Structures are given as structure tokens and as C-alpha cells.
Image: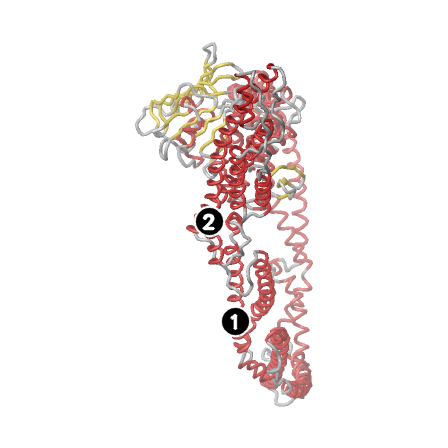
Amino acid sequence: MKIRKIEIYGYGKWVNQTFDDVQDLQVFHGKNEAGKSTLSSFINSILFGFPNARKKDQNLYVPKQAQAYGGRLFLADTRFGDVIVERVKDRNKGQAVVTLADGVQQTTKNLGRFLLGMDRETFESLYTFKIDSLLSLKKTQKEDLNHYLLSIGTSGSERLLQLAKEYRDEAAKRFKPTGSVPPLNKKIQAAEKLQRKLQQSKAKNATYETSLLHLSDSQKQQAELLARQQELEQEQTAIAESLRLADSYQEWKRLNKEITAVDYSEVPEDARYQWQSQQERMAASIQAQTQLQEKLAQLQKQLGEFVHVEWYKEHQSDFAALQHSVAKTQADLNKITYLENEVSNNKADLAKQKMAFGLNLALPTPEPLKEEERVRLQRLAQDFKQIEEQLLRLDHNIGFHEEQLETLQKEETRLQHEKLADDAYAALQSDVQQPSQRRSTPAVTKKSPLGLLFVAAAVFLVLSFVLADFRAIAWALSAVLAVGGAILTRRKQQTRTKDVASPEGSPENTMEQFLKQAAVRERISAITRELEELQDKFLEILNDREELEERGKILKTEWEIFLQQKGYPARMTAPELLQLDPGAVLAEKSALIIKQEAEMDDLSLAVDKWNEQTAFIRSRFHFEHLTVTEMAARFPEILNAVVLEESMAANVQDKINELQQELELIQRDLAESHRQRQQLLDQANAKTEAEFYQLLALKEKQEQNLKRKEFLDEQVNGREQLLDRYGDAKKSMSLYEKNDLEMQQLKAELSRLQRTEVELKHQLEQLEEGGIYSALLQEFALAETELRDLAVEWAGLVTAGEWIERALRYGKEDRLPLMLDDTITFFSRLTEGAYTGIAFQKNGMKVQRQDGTTFFPNELSQGTVEQLYIALRLAFVKNTADIVSMPILIDDGFVNFDEDRKNIMFTLLEELSENVQVLFFTFDDACVQRFSQKQVYMLK
């Protein structure tokens, strides 16, 4: 079932208000007093009835301006299709008017037929989420919280089955097919009986009045005869009683005369017993007095043996102060020992860390890096990195150019070997031009230093890679030597000793040699130009590298100065210093040591102060040699000893006081006994004990007469007038016989009248079996109306119960496992994976944390309990949506959630709204951004 439109005539602040096109997930957003709770209450009232003042509902939402109090809901997806539910307070006695899809209207007090038998309590407990529900969790007793959540978790189909069972049980209380006790059964039987009586009443109504008059006369006569019979019985009883007590009455008169002859009233009734009791009491008191006096002497001696009692009483407040702080002192001593070990370990760790950082233990610890120093170090590290990268690139270029120079030089050397001397080349040229003239010119060979120059350049190049500091100079020297070798190769050619082309030979050979020498000379010229260009570039690269090395030296010098100023070893690099910051690490450790040492000083002061307060104990028990640790350890023993001694002394003193009180009581008892004995003598007017005993004997005889008189009093008292009236025994016997004869006659007459009465009553019962005709007719009509109402009510209960059970029977079976899985999923999502399991057990519910620890709900925090409560409710609604598809009303149920859990909750609501309609009333502005404009109603 889903709500598609809300139309309010008047309800609280809402007057003539309509909400169209309500979505499956609809948000009603507004600030406080915008009417969110009023709108939620309106939906509840239309479905289940208006708030009732007699039930003391807090807010009736009666509109102040609107004429009508109520409105309409347009429902879709009900078992009757699309319906309209209208409820107005003053119409149809507040009952709901349901308009079906075919236009037929029905009036009903509750919507059980359309809402699967759902009542207000079930809807509010399962489908309504309010902040009050979450706040009530705080008020729930811890021992009741587990049962409360368990009832929510298992209230799926069981709650609806219970509701169906309640309907069936209530119907069974009203009617059973074979029963006779239920109200409907009784009413049917009564109606059938009334119908038979109504038919019989017509024939028996004529003779009823006559029989009723005869019965009244008979009863009146019986009453008169019974009164006479009672009077005779009383007189007969009095006569018999007077004859039985005649002898006792005479004895009673005699004893009265004897008792009143002598007066012993002054002598107590138990005078003999009192005298003997006092004698025994005095003897016992004297014996007890002697025993108490002996015990007092022993206790006084024992009390004098307790020597520390008075001293302890003088210093009891000091003991109390020491006892109050001894536990703290012992804890302080333990803490001092612990801190000493910690300080020692931390100092050792500090030394190890300084050594690990390469710091001198004798020098102060470097200070932590400042922000400007960090910026400087980052710049240095970046500059070092850039220089290294540029040097690598330059080294690569130098190697490349050296290889090119070496290749060109080798080619030039080869060509120089192939090249003829200038005079030989001139001769070839002349021969080519004038073939007839042939000359032979010998070549002069000279030893050239070119090889030595190239060897020296190679040596310097190798040294540049071996000695880093000599690298720039070596490269410069090798470059100079290479350039010199190239120039010397061009200008000072070695002359080879070989014969120039012999004048002898063909002109074709001469021309070939000439062309070859011309090509060689041309290639040598090209190589010379390339060498000059390459050497210029090579020198430029060497200059750049020299500049970078100079810049690197400057940076290295700056870095070394910085390390020296800070006190760090020269081996430490800028990135290492930035990453580790030994000064900060060591400063933190040093600060911890200083803090621990300061704490040790504070604890030592407190311990010394406590130790000074024990001076009075040390001097009393000669414990000056004990250390504060030993004193703290022995203090409880000392305190227990003096407290025990004080307690024992107090116990002895209490016993002495008790014995003194007992002794005083005994002495008072002795005095009282003497006084009471004298009082007995005075009461009896006796001067001696012998006279007292004689009076007692006379008193006892009189008491015997009194006992006999008391026995007779029970028989005679109250009967004196009766005994005097019937004192003549002969006349009394004659009267007794006469009365007996009259009583027999009365019994016979009464027996006859009683038989007549029985016959008349039987006749009247037969006439009254159907009652008076008019009364029976009215009674039958009333019974018929009551029978019809009971039958309609019984049929409604049976139909509701059967319908719910059929709905559950055709729904999913055994929903608890599915609901439990969804509850675990929802709870895990709401707690962001902190809790991963839930188990329903006989003794309650348990939840499992991610680390495997299990908790009862009353052991969880308030926020976690709220998330568990909501997960249970959502899981139930989801798994019963195919049976009971009711909309969910949420009235700011998640205001205590943080932003992350709110977003998770909104996602869950979106998923749930695919099967169940969700109406969300909130003031949270995050909803406006989260949901679409169509899903949000802005309340003002």
C-alpha cells in the first residue's frame, strides 16, 4: 500500500492543504514548527482514528481556523486497488469512509480489512520511526534493553500471527459451535428459550392471578403458626432450663453468703507465689553480684596491659591522614622506580640515536630544523640533484665527442700515411700535365712527435676518471694535447721514404696516382675542418663542466658549513637530514627524559613529605632506621596492631561498662525485692512472716469457694429471673406437658399448609415458565438485536484472523534467517564495518565486532544501539513487504547520526523505497542536496 496524495481539510496548523504526487521516497523538509510532526500525525489519524482526549493524548491537533477536522488519503496498491480513505471528526462518529475503485463507499471504524488487520500499536511499533523511539532507548533499563531489541528483531510474521491469534481467541470467547458458555452461545440458547416461552405464555396467562392469591393466603397463615410455634418452643426451653438448674441455683446462693462474710481483698491473689519468688530472686541476685565483682576485677587488670591505646587516640587523626595517603605513597615509590628505569633506558636510547646519527656524545644535541632551514635544505638538495644530473649529461657528451675526435684523428692519420709529400705530389702533377718530363724525387722521412702527444692525452683522460678532484685539469690537458696533435698532423707531415712514381711507367698509372692523391688531400682538408669544429664544441663542453664543478664546490662548501654549524657529521646528506631531522627526534627524546625527571622530583617530594609525617611512629616504636619504602610497607601492619589494641581495649572497656550496668541492675533488684516483701506484709496487715502465712491459708480457702461460685455463675448468671419464675417444679411440669400437646397440633397444621404452598408454587412455575406475554415479547426482540450484534462482531473477528493467516501462509516461510542476514548487512553498513555479526539466542541477542569480540546490546554505546535498532526495523520491513506493504513514517529519526552515517542511511532508504514507500519528515538541509527536487516537499 502506498500513499499517492494527501488532502487535509483541517488538522493542527494545516488548513485546506494538498500534497500531490507523493513519491516512493518522499522527503517533507522544514524547520521547527513547520508542521512535519503534524503531517505525520495526520496520516496516522486518518488510518487509525483521531487522538482521544480521554486517553490523555498530548496533542489533539484540533484546527483553530478550519471548519472541518480531518481530511483524505489517496491510497494505491491495496488489495482493492486504488481507494480513498476519508475521516472527519464530526461525521459518521469519526469513522472512516472508504471509497473503492468502483465508487462504492463503506463506513468502518477501523481499516482492518484494508490494512491486513494492522492496528495502531503494531503500525507505530514497526513502521513509524521517531526520535522519541531512539531517545526511549536511553531510558530503557540495561537489563531490559536486550529483551526489547530481541522482540523487535523477531517481531516479523510472529507479530502478525500473534495478532491473528488474538482475533481468533477473541472470536472463540464469543462463540463455539459445540459450546454453551460463550456469550453468543448463551444468547442463542436464551433466544430459543424465550421463543418457546412466548408461545406457551398465550395459553397459561388466564389462571395465573388466582393461583397467586391462594399462595399469598397460605404463606400468611404459615407465618402466624410459625410465630406461635416459636413462642411455645422458647417457653418450653425456659421450663426445662429452670428444672435442670434448680440444685445449682441453691448452692450458688449459699456460696454468696459465705464469701461476703470475711473480706480478704487486701491480700494479693498470688501473695504466696510473690513471697517465694522474691526469696528466690534475692538469693540469685546475691550470687550474681559476687560473680560480677570478680569479673570486674579481672577486666580492670586486663585493661591496664594495653599501653598504646592513649597514644593512638592522641594521634588518631595523624594515622588517618597517613592511611589515606599510604597507598598513593607506595604507588609513587613504584612510579619512581619505574621512572628511574625509564630515564636510564631513554638516556641509553638517546646515546644510541646520537651515535646512529654520527653525532659526538660530548657535544650538545643539535636543535630541530626550523622552517627557513628546511626551505634552505630543500633548495640545496634540489641544487645538488640538478648539478649531478647536468654533470652526468656533460660527461656523456664529453665521451661522445672524445669518440668522434678519436675516430676523425685515426682517419686523418691513415690518410696522412697515404698522402705523398708536396714535392712528390708536384712531380705527379707535372707529369700529368707534361707526361714527357719524368723526375724522381726521394722523400725525406722525419720522426714526428704526434704519437707521443696522443699517448699523453690518453693518459690524462684515464686519470680524469680515476681521480675525481683532478678530473677537470686532466680533461683540459688531454684536450690541449689532442688539439696540438691534430695541428701538428696537418702542418708537420712526416715524409715517407718511398719512391715517388717512377719516371718510368705508363701515363695511365701516373694519372691514377695523381687523382688518388688529390682525393686524399681533399678528404684531409674536410677532416681538418670537422676536427676544428668538434674541438671547439669539446672545449665549450669542458668549460661548462668546469663551471658546474665550481658551483658544486661552492654548494658543497655551503653544505659543509651548515653541517658544521648544526653539529652534524660531514657524511650526512641534505635529503637524509630533511627526512630524519635528528634534532627533532633527539629533542623529543630529551624532552621526555626531562619530563620524567621532573615527575620523579615531584614524586620524591611527595614521598619525603609523607615520610616526615611518620616521625611520631618512628620515635614511638624506634623505627628511625627504616627507609621510606620499608616504612610504607610496614605502616599497614603498625596501624592494624594499634587499631587492634585499641579495639581490644575498647572491647574490654565495653565489657566493664556492661558488667557495671549489670551490677547496678542487680543491686536495684535486691532493693526492689526488699521493698516488695515489706509491701506484701503491709497489704496483709501482718507484722511477722508467721502471721502472713496464716492469712494466706484463709485466703486460699476463700479462693476455692470463689472458683466454685465462678463455675456456678456460668450456669446461673442471667437466669435468676427465669429460675425465680419457674421455682415451683410441679406447676412447671404441668405447663410443659400442655405446651407440648399444642405444639404437635401446630406441626400438623403447618405440614398441611406447606403441601398446599408447594402445589401452588408448582402451578405458578408452570404458568410463569414463559413469563407474561408482553414482557416476553419485548425481551425476545431485545435478545434478537443483541444476538445479531454479537454475530456480526464474531464474524468480523473470524474474518480478520483468517485473512491475516492466509496472507502469511501464502507469503514467504521462515523469514527470520533472511531478516537476520539483512539486519547484519544494514548494521555493518551503518557502523562502517565495525560490527559484522548478530545472533539471536534464547538468553538474548549478541553482536560481533570485527575483531571477533561479542557484546550484549546493553554493553554497546548509545549511538551503536540506535544503529542496531534501526537495522532491525528496516530488515523486518524489507522482509515483510510482500505480505504487509505499509508506508514507513520517519520523523527525524537520524538527527544524532554523523554525516557519513547519514549518507549511508539515505542510501538504505533509497534501496528500501524500491519495495516500500518511505515518508521522511526532517529539518536536515543535507536531504535537499541529496534527493531530487521532485522527492522533496519544502514545508514553510
| Residue type, mark 2 in image | Leu
Which residue matches tag 2? 555
Q: Nearer the viewer, residue 561 or 51?
A: 561
* Residue drawn at x 67%, y 46% as measured from the top left: 740
Q: Position of residue 309 (x, y in %)?
A: 59, 82
97 with respect to 329 (left or right): left
In the rendered image, the vertical position of residue 475 relative to residue 620, given as above or below: above
Res 858 → quadrant: top right
Q: Would residue 816 be seen by someone viewing this image from the given angle?
A: yes
* Residue drawn at x 69%, y 58% as measured from the top left: 244
Numbered circle sitting on residue 500: none
Q: Earlier in the sequence, mark 2 or mark 1?
A: 2
Which one is in front in this view, the residue at disc 2 or the one at disc 1?
Answer: 2
Badge 2 local density, few (<14 within 10 Å), some, or many (20+)? some
In the rendered image, the vertical position of residue 822 relative to residue 701, given as above or below: above
Q: CA distance from mark 2 to mark 1?
A: 56 Å
4 with respect to 348 (left or right): left
Q: Quadrant of the C terminus?
A: top left
Q: Please, which residue is most extreme toward the left here?
A: 65
Q: Nearer the viewer, residue 279 or 394?
A: 394
Q: Nearer the viewer, residue 446 or 365?
A: 446
Which residue matches tag 1? 606
In the rendered image, the vertical position of residue 699 relative to residue 112, given as above or below: below
